[in-house]
Image (cartoon, grey):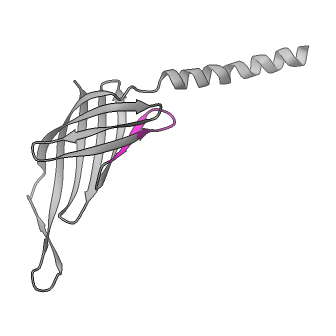
């Protein structure tokens, strides 16, 4: 009996830990306003040789905004749509096991985020495609 009681007492912190982790899972659903600072390199293909030439778009960082609408979440996975004034694409993501980070993909890039609060994330984005290479940092604020 004493051994059984001892085993129950030792296992209780593990049970509370599992419940706390599930309860702390962020709700990603909603509309997020994203402000961006970054750098981009355009790729120009030479007409005759087919050689790719890299031409910087700007000498300094660019700034932009977009909106991300997360429309569904199933536990640690979620998906939605990214919209800027020039484009729209699907995005999908996963939460880290400790619920402190989110990692997302779109059609040609990926975003890694640190969750600062239920309504704010700080992120980095990397994109490499046939037209350009893009690297930026982002602040996500839930609307």
Above or below: residue 61 compared with residue 46: above
Where residue 79 sits in the image (x, y, percent)?
Answer: 35, 38
The number of discs equals 0
Q: Quadrant of the N terminus?
A: top right
Looking at this view, is 140 or 106 the one in front?
Answer: 106
Above or below: residue 60 compared with residue 70: below
Where residue 76 sits in the image (x, y, percent)?
Answer: 46, 34
Which image quadrant for residue 118? Answer: top left
Which image quadrant for residue 50? Answer: bottom left
As drawn, the residue found furthest toward the right would be 1
Assess whether residue 102 is covered by the magenta stretch: yes
Above or below: residue 128 compared with residue 114: below
Q: Give the magenta range.
A: 94-105
Q: Tell me which residue sits at (47%, 31%) in the image.
A: 75
Q: Is residue 75 left or right of residue 109?
A: right
Q: Is residue 32 left or right of residue 9?
A: left
Q: Tell me which residue sits at (86%, 17%) in the image.
A: 4
Looking at this view, is 60 or 126 the one in front?
Answer: 126
Q: Is residue 9 left or right of residue 65?
A: right
Assess whether residue 93 is covered by the magenta stretch: no
Q: Quadrant of the C terminus?
A: top left
Above or below: residue 75 compared with residue 12: below
Q: Tell me which residue sits at (17%, 45%) in the image.
A: 37
Q: Tell me which residue sits at (12%, 45%) in the image.
A: 63
Which image quadrant for residue 39? Answer: bottom left
Where residue 134 sits in the image (x, y, percent)?
Answer: 21, 56
């Amino acid at each position: 009996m004493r051994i059984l009681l001892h085993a129950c007492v030792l296992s209780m912190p593990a049970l509370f830990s599992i419940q706390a982790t599930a309860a702390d899972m962020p709700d990603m659903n909603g509309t997020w306003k994203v402000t961006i600072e970054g750098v981009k390199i355009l790729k120009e293909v030479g007409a005759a040789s087919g050689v790719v030439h890299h031409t910087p778009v700007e000498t300094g960082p660019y700034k932009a905004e977009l909106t991300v609408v997360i429309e569904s979440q199933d536990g640690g996975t979620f998906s939605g749509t990214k919209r800027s004034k020039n484009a729209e694409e699907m995005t999908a993501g996963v939460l880290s096991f400790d619920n402190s980070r989110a990692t997302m993909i779109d059609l040609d890039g990926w975003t890694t985020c640190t969750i600062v609060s239920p309504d704010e994330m700080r992120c980095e984005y990397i994109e490499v495609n046939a037209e350009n290479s893009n690297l930026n940092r982002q602040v996500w604020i839930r609307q």
